[in-house]
Image: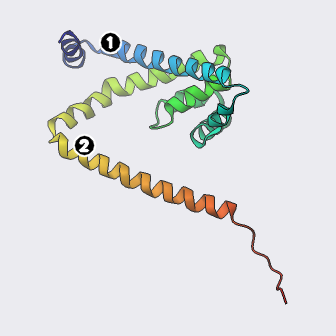
Amino acid sequence: MIIAESISWLINDAPFGVTFIFFFLGAFARGNATYWVGRGLAKGVEHTRFQKHLHGPVYRRAQKFIGRWGLFAIPLSFLTLGIQSAVNASAGISRMPLRRYLPAVAVGALLWSTIYTTVGLAVFYAWLALDWPWVAGGLALIGVVVLIVLRRRARTRSAQESAPPESSEINC
């Protein structure tokens, strides 16, 4: 009951600065927790059969993102959906130095808290004003369709990459 009242106060009645700081600290703590989980995973699975799982497609994509965008990858990940945790964990797995990671995650948390304190809450309020079960159901349906399409594309791409090259020789 106290938690629900606190959340209600934070969303409805708290001054902008309090809400902003709350969102900033939450994003900063989450980013760092994910980073340290990544560091722990990398250390814990070294030289085990589970090391191959850290080289899956999501982490490979996140590491390419980090490699391509360098210090910008962490803050930019806070503006994306779906790879924020993977990018932060990949920074931990790849042992990104804290002197580079902490400023980057602070900028990302600032971006995230700015969005969610302003536009994010407006979208949240609009969503609450709608007949949300239908909206949630529609979004879930769209999500399922997108996942099916993406998986089919990935399978097709994988099949094309693993297919033997066509021979131009004619066997007589």
Q: Residue at x 75, y 74 (%)?
A: 166
Q: Residue at x 57, y 62 (%)?
A: 156
Residue 57: which numbered mark, if any? Answer: none
Percent coordinates x, y for residue 12 in the rendering: 19, 19
Residue 17: which numbered mark, if any? Answer: 1
The image quadrant that residue 67 belongs to is top right
- Local crowd size for mark 2, using a 10 Å CA cut-off: few (<14), some (14–19), many (≥20): few
- Local crowd size for mark 1, using a 10 Å CA cut-off: few (<14), some (14–19), many (≥20): few
Query: Is 148 on the left or on the right of 102, as rendered?
Result: left
Local SS, label 1: helix
Percent coordinates x, y for residue 42 in the rendering: 65, 24
Residue 136: which numbered mark, if any? Answer: 2
Local SS, label 2: helix
Q: Is residue 106 visible?
A: no
Q: Residue furthest bottom?
A: 172
The Cα–Cα distance between marks 1 and 2, rounded to whole angstroms, is: 30 Å
- The amino acid at mark 2 is Ala
- Residue sitting nearer the eye, 152 or 74: 152
- The amino acid at mark 1 is Gly
